[in-house]
Image (tube, helix red, strand yellow):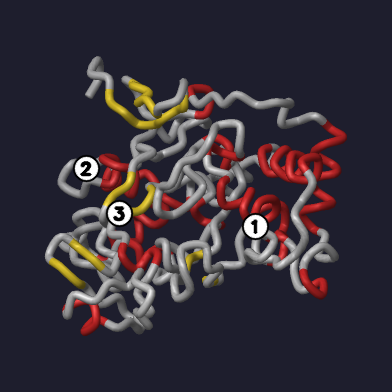
């Protein structure tokens, strides 16, 4: 609410994490990170782009960063089990354009040091720097190579929507969708606040929420369509992290709240949700892949209203 500071982001100001109060929806200029070098330092960015697209440093030259985050940080829309929260934890490939503006970088909301990419490069640092056996199964990156890669990813900007009118204004369907988006009875703007007329709006509260996609929900265990996991073992009280456990319920399977992503470039960042269970934007709001009315209250909307809402999202 206007005039009432709300916590919508966090920064590390010392040994402990402290909340960063904001009175307005989060926008690009309001997020600042301490960086050792400018994200636009040309020689580092160029070197980082080379590293981003180079597969030679991975085991047997299998793949590079661009294999999943193709075309300068976009996404293939595929899901992967990278083992960073334990094997059996499938995750959607994140769209990383504009990622420097909005921590954290991971679906579950883990936040790292602001000097590391977008507030959470612990995963990137582990991929390329600290753990040679992780993901790429290669030798550790040198500090310079890692820093160059971070600078390149910091330099990736949002592309902007091609779905608006030629003059940048909203179409009639998008205007109708905007009204639905901001309708308190629907609730989209509760977690994705922002003004469509502000080109710097990020449309995220930078918090984590249960939107009905995790294995463990407010009403207990839930089954996500298309996913296979050992529910009986969990109900029996087995510890999936125990040394004697063979239960494939690990990592994100035990997380119920996930990071609120920016809606900028949302048209280009599918598939959607942390596990890629929503193939299309319409699937994120029609209650087909998550618990009813937990990702916006949309069950009362008509098919046309849902399509108008999708058209508005494509305009961001």
For label 3, count other residues whose C-alpha is less than 10 Å away and answer few (under 14), some (14-19) or many (20+): many
Q: Is residue 188 left or right of residue 92?
A: left
| Residue 133 vertical placement versus 141 (above, below) | below
Residue 259 or residue 302, whichever sits in front: 259
Percent from the top left, x then y, of residue 162?
59, 50
Q: Is residue 174 left or right of residue 64?
A: left
Which residue is under mark 2? 183
Percent from the top left, x then y, of residue 184?
18, 41
Which residue shows up at 42% across the image and 67% down it? 275
Q: Distance from label 2 to label 3 (Cα)?
A: 23 Å
Q: Which label sits in the foreground, 1 or 2?
A: 1
Can you name the residue that lies furthest to the top here? 3
Percent from the top left, x then y, of residue 304?
29, 63
| Residue 117 vertical placement versus 245 (above, below) | above
Q: Distance from label 1 to label 2 (Cα)?
A: 47 Å
Which residue shows up at 42% across the image and 62% down it? 274
Q: Is residue 315 left or right of residue 71?
A: left
* Element class at badge 1: loop
* Element class at badge 2: loop
Query: What numbered label is drawn on residue 257?
Result: 3
* Element class at badge 3: loop
| Residue 217 vertical placement versus 102 (above, below) | below
User: Decide: marks 1, 2 in contact (CB < 8 A)?
Assistant: no
Counting residues from the start of the chain, the first of labels 1 and 2 encountered is 1
Which residue is under mark 1? 131
């Amino acid at each position: 609410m206007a005039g009432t500071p709300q916590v919508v982001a966090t920064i590390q100001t010392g040994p402990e994490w402290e909340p960063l109060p904001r009175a307005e929806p989060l926008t690009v200029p309001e997020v600042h990170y301490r960086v050792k070098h400018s994200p636009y330092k040309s020689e580092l960015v160029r070197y980082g782009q080379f590293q981003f697209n180079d597969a030679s440093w991975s085991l047997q030259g299998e793949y590079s960063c661009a294999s999943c985050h193709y075309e300068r940080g976009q996404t293939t829309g595929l899901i992967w089990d990278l083992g960073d929260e334990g094997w059996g934890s499938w995750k959607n490939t994140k769209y990383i354009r504009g990622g420097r503006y909005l921590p954290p970088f991971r679906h579950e909301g883990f936040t790292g040091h602001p000097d590391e990419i977008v507030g959470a490069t612990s995963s990137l640092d582990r991929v390329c720097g600290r753990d040679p056996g992780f993901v790429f199964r290669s030798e550790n990156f040198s500090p310079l190579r890692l820093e160059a890669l971070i600078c390149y990813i910091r330099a990736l900007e949002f592309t902007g929507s091609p779905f608006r009118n030629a003059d940048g204004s909203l179409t009639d369907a998008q205007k109708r969708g905007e009204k639905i988006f901001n309708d308190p009875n629907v609730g989209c703007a509760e977690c994705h606040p922002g003004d469509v007329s502000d080109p710097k709006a990020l449309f995220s509260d930078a918090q984590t929420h249960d939107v009905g996609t995790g294995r463990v929900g407010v009403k207990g265990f839930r089954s996500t369509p298309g996913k296979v996991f050992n529910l009986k073992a969990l109900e029996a009280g087995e510890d999936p992290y125990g040394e004697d456990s063979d239960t494939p319920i690990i990592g994100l399977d035990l997380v119920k709240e996930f990071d609120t992503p920016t809606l900028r470039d949302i048209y280009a960042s599918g598939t959607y949700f942390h596990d890629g269970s929503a193939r299309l934007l319409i699937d994120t709001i029609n209650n087909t892949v998550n618990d009813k009315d937990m990702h916006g209250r949309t069950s009362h909307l008509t098919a046309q209203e849902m399509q108008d809402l999708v058209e508005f999202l494509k305009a961001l």
